[in-house]
Image: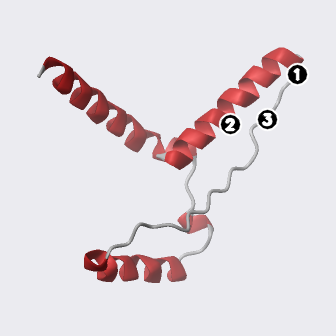
Amino acid sequence: MNMYAFTELQKLLAERLSERMGRLIRVGQYNHIADSFHIYGSYFEEFKGFLETLDRRTFEQRTFTSEQIAPLIEEAREKIAASLAEEESG
């Protein structure tokens, strides 16, 4: 979710700068490196499998575009909105 939010912010800023400057400002590449996976003892074996898959994949196989992840974000937005609506009515 953080990566998607940062890329959306990057896109918004490029659009606003383009408007203000009167010329096209393109969105550059965004790289996000997370080094805090919040691993707890009970999940170590699952995480170990995750790390093993990273070793077998190329950089391109480990990266995603905003367009690829957009459906997951939209699903999350819908769930959050439904949860908030339930909380407000409850």
Q: Say if 55 sits above or below 88 in the image.
A: below
Q: Tell me the distance, in whole angstroms, between the alpha carbons under discs 3 and 2.
A: 10 Å
| Badge number at residue 6 | none
Quadrant showing the C terminus: top left
Query: Does dot 2 land on a helix, a strand or a loop?
Result: helix
* Front in this rendered view, residue 77 or 53: 77
In-image side of 35 versus 82 (left or right): right
- Residue 86, given in percent of the width and then of the height, sits at 17, 25
| Badge number at residue 23 | 1
Query: Does dot 1 land on a helix, a strand or a loop?
Result: loop
- The three-letter amino acid code for the residue at tag 2 is Gln
| Badge number at residue 10 | 2
Q: Of callouts 2 and 1, which one flags the residue occurring earlier in the amino acid sequence?
A: 2
Examine the image and state in which quarter residue 84 appears: top left
Q: Of callouts 3 and 2, which one flags the residue occurring earlier in the amino acid sequence?
A: 2
Q: Tell me the distance, in whole angstroms, between the alpha carbons under discs 2 and 1.
A: 16 Å
Of tags 3 and 2, which is closer to the observer?
2
The residue at the point 66 percent across, 28 percent down is: 12
